[in-house]
Image: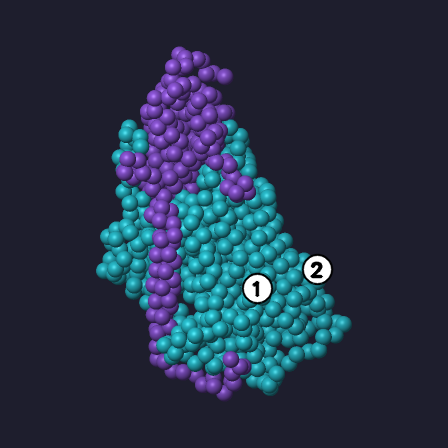
Amino acid sequence: MQTPLMQTTGRESILQALLTGLRFSVLMLVLCGVIYSGAVTLLAEQLFPRQASGSLVQQNGIAIGSELIAQPFTSERYFHGRPSAANHDPMATTGSNLAPSNPALRERVAADSARIQARENVESKTIPVDLLAASGGGLDPHISPASAHLQAARIAQTRQWKIDEVNALIDRHTEGPQWGLFGQPRVNVLLLNLALDTASAQPRSSHDRFHPKESDDD
Amino acid sequence: MIEILLLVLIPLLLAWPLGLYMTGIFSGKPHISDRLFLPLESALFRLSGINPARGMDWKSYGRAFLFSNLILGLLAFVLLLLQSWLPLNPDGIGPLSWDLALHTAVSFLTNTNQQHYSGQAQLSYFSQSIVLVTLQFVTPAMGLAICAAVLRGMNGGRNAETAQENEERDLGNYYVDLVRGVVRLLLPLAMVTALLLAAQGVPSTYDGAQKTAVLDATSEIKEQTIPLGPVAAMVAIKQLGTNGGGWYGPNSANPLENPTPVSNAIETMSIVLIPMAVVFMAGGLLRRRGFTLMSLAAMGLLSALCIGASIYSEQLPNAAFAGLAAEGPNLEGKEVRFGADASALWATLTTQTSSGSVNAMHDSLNPLAGLVTRAGMLVNAIWGGIGCGFVNFLVYVWITVFLAGLMIGRTPEIFGRKIETREITLLGALIVLPTLCILGLTAFTVAIPALTGNSNPGFHGIAQVFYEYTSAFANNGSGFEGLGDNTPWWNLSCVLVLLVGRYLPLVIPLMIAGSLARKRVAPVSSGSLRLENATFCLTLVTVILILNFLSFLPATVLGPIGEALELAQTE
């Protein structure tokens, strides 16, 4: 491993140089593409089988979705997620790529804002931004806790719950910053809606103390 | 705020020991890592017929660099073209058009990873995990090799003690440097990172896409297809190697590619870790710790200013939401789990380095952050791409030394070696080159609306075109992605810019280093220009800013500045 002598610098022919390049390139394809990719992938699949195959959520043995991927929710009985420029198709994942100066963005936000105002019976200035802004990949599985609470009254009404119960469910499904340090508070819409269904299906002991729905315009 | 500080300071702290390690593996002396890696490296040299003991002058070094690129690029192009006939294609993905395959091969060969395709839908597992991943390992190591050779040249080469004045200097062996970068640096780091990312939820399988039902039976779609693959392995090296080319179309904004805030933290830190470590390595190889400190100060200052501006920008509301939503930051094109700050930080770091990966859509950034991202790419030397970023930084240093020399009326010297007509002519070419490529092609493309493929009107439309060429020239790869860029015009014109933007800014400094290396070293005197102090650092920062203002301010007025003024007017 010592400082080589410049005498050995004799220049190789072009053909030789190309041949060296070819042999080297093929070796790198094997080392990085086949061995590295293969070893890491198979090891990760063994160590983290659930994450490795897309973090699927199973219900009665059927994959009902991935906890990482937003699903479309249109029914009044469910919490709704963020607008998706990909129409919630993971194969077409994309953001809107609309600039703040683009009139098309303003039109879209205005239409969505009007729809949410009517649906949730709220004023525009209470709608959290994330509920109107299209996500980067069109598949953001989360909404902010504020966006979930905004929908609590509607959920309570359609499911005949008390609004406090809905809010409590949201709070239970609110994730804070990860490790207390990274990221924003958020609610996974699919998991929250699954919890809603589960809770609605179970005959709850609290059922008999259910009162007729009270006004929830607080 | 704590999160942002951690995401910048942790990689800076880790870069220190990593930089020392890199100094060790590129210094040519025996190193403790030899015992672990030497057997594999020797096997690679034997199998490819390389004599690792052979020293190379700048010409041989540059020649080996260019030939290895030519072959690797051709091989990648052919394999991409043949993808529908090759194995590892469980989703039955069809062939690419020849111009898209060419653009993709060149884009990954130049460490740019500009993507005119959507990975999950258009590339097979073979193309992504074998062809592209290999390029993502080899190309950053190529930049690092050139950087090591240039630094050796600045100290007179490895034969500095024995060589005569004007004798060609030994800048090292290209293939040895390249293999060491891959085997001793990138592979171990990528393995660890890939497993950490897989634990957070990045897919890692050779199985095909999974079909799942959807919960809400009233929605318009009845099932989802979740695209999978050996994603974690690629994402790790994509982030670490300042590559940026992700598995899925929207890159790390896609929740499969970047599922949690912790995966986001790992990926953010991976963007800057090695570029920061190169700064420490440079001081080590030059045996000038002061030069590392001066470089860190200059880069750190510019980086911090840009991060501040971009976070401030994204904390402001998006103008399109005025009166329609609660007050809040700009979240269009961003993910809730990351929020505006961490997205603005990523956008800044990914454009300062040549990474170009994204965790938010740059097209939807507010104008100021849009400006910060393109400024990062135009300067292209704040941390910068692995190796090539520091080489660009040295170009600014040489120019500053020349200007400062003129100001104090002394022959410009760097570490005792004179910068003369030959060097300054070459440096001049490097200043003119980006202006010519980026402005020339932007002007041409904007003049022919049929070519542009804009998704946004007005100033932002011009900015989209400018961004695409800037990203190609800077070998960055991020985009204002609304641009309809998979057309023969965009593919082929970007191929040209990619090639010019990669090879000339690496080969010309290699020439300069070769010529500096041969010069007689003047002894340090009281009149010598000192590089390792605050005065030089601030002069350097000023030169970087002035050069870029002179070249690109008018174009910026027609882009983000115009857009900002337009938005201010409508409010």
Q: For this view, does B396 lie left or right of residue B440? A: right
Please give the letter of the chain rendered in cyan.
Answer: B
Q: Check the image and report above or below for B553 versus A61.
A: below
The dot on residue B19 is 1
First along the sequence among labels 2 and 1: 1
The dot on residue B371 is none
Task: Report whether mark 2 lies on the same chain as mark 1.
Answer: yes
Query: Which residue is at a point 51% across and 36% down the rendered structure image?
Result: A176
Query: Which residue is at a point 48% across and 51% down the rendered structure image?
Result: B267
Q: Check the image and report above or below for B492 versus B402.
A: above
Residue B121: give x, y in percent of width and height.
Answer: 30, 49
Residue at the far right in the pictured view:
B526
Which is more toward the observer, A97 or B424?
A97
SS at circle 2? helix
SS at circle 1? helix
Q: Numbered disc 2: what chain?
A: B
Which is more toward the observer, B318 or B137?
B137
